[in-house]
Amino acid sequence: MLPLLAQVKITDRNGAGQNCVQQDGFCPGWIKDHIGDYVDPLVRHLELTVVSVVAGFLIAFALAMLAHRRRWLVAPITGATGVMYTIPSLALFGILLPITGFGFVTGCIALTAYNLLVIFRNIMAGLDNVPEAAKDAATGMGMTPNQVLRQVELPLAIPEIVAGVRVATTTTVGLAALAFIAGAGGLGEPLIVNQNFKSNVVTVGVLCVLLAAVLDLLLLLAERLALPWRRVAR
């Protein structure tokens, strides 16, 4: 048997916790007891983000390579991706639902569409900022245009390209919180499943920030590994 004072303390603590939940306050105890409910949504959120950013990068990279050779395509591609970027997320989910239905695919398509403009513009900016002297020197050494692109332009454009991917990644982490509307899951789903809305919002917000920070650090590390000459210069 617990001492009477200890029993009173436990009762008071439980009562305070129940009142906090009933009053929809910020309840650290409730978060501690329910943190396990966020593991699966967090994993799905990560999957949504990674798949969407990778798909967006592959599409934007292909469009950038095409536009780099045919400069007249830059304006149409920028305009088309810009239009997709300006569509409100809820509206885009609504447009896609009758076509692709509820599920992971619908969420990924919408999130991928929002990545295209940022990544495409950064790839083009990186390629455009390559010094002409570097390209002329490579051409003078006998390199073909494709070799100049692969061995000179793309390596020198890596900082701008990675910067675009970093922006797209952090943006996608935030937008993916709305993907549950399309049935794709993610960290937004617990907001309508669990009780205690305020504690839910705080927990989801903190997890989104932490996820974005971790992914951003990983991309920054990948950039440094891809640019060994910068480490040597330092």
Image (tube, rainbow, N blue to C red):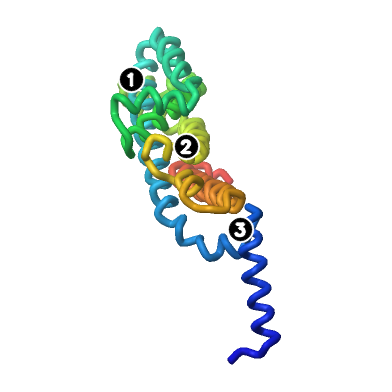
Name the one closer to the observer, 225 or 94: 94
What label does residue 21 carry, if any? Answer: 3
Camera-near label (1 vs 3) is 3
Name the element at disc 2: helix
Query: With 88 as the anchor, is 95 left or right in this view?
Result: left
Res 133 seen here: no
Q: Which residue is mark 2?
A: 178
Name the element at disc 3: helix
Amino acid type for the residue under numbered disc 1: Pro
What label does residue 145 carry, if any? Answer: 1
- From the top left corner, tell me how far across and down residue 179 is, in percent: 43, 37
Residue at x 42%, y 33% (from the top left corner): 155
Q: Is residue 75 above or below residue 130?
A: above
Camera-near label (2 vs 1) is 2
Name the one closer to the observer, 55 or 190: 190
Q: Of label 1 and label 3, which has the lower sequence position?
A: 3
Name the one closer to the observer, 188 or 81: 188
Query: With 92 as the anchor, is 101 left or right in this view?
Result: left
Could you give the CA–CA distance between mark 2 and mark 1, rounded to whole angstroms?
43 Å
Could you give the CA–CA distance between mark 2 and mark 3, rounded to whole angstroms?
24 Å
**Label 1, residues with CA under 10 Å away: few <14, some 14-19, many ≥20:** few
Q: Of label 2 and label 3, which has the lower sequence position?
A: 3
**Label 3, residues with CA under 10 Å away: few <14, some 14-19, many ≥20:** some
Res 26 seen here: yes
Could you give the CA–CA distance between mark 1 and mark 3, rounded to whole angstroms?
65 Å
Q: Is residue 77 above or below residue 220?
A: above
Quadrant that contains the N terminus: bottom right
What label does residue 189 carry, if any? Answer: none
Amino acid type for the residue under numbered disc 2: Leu
> Which quarter of the picture shows residue 75?
top left
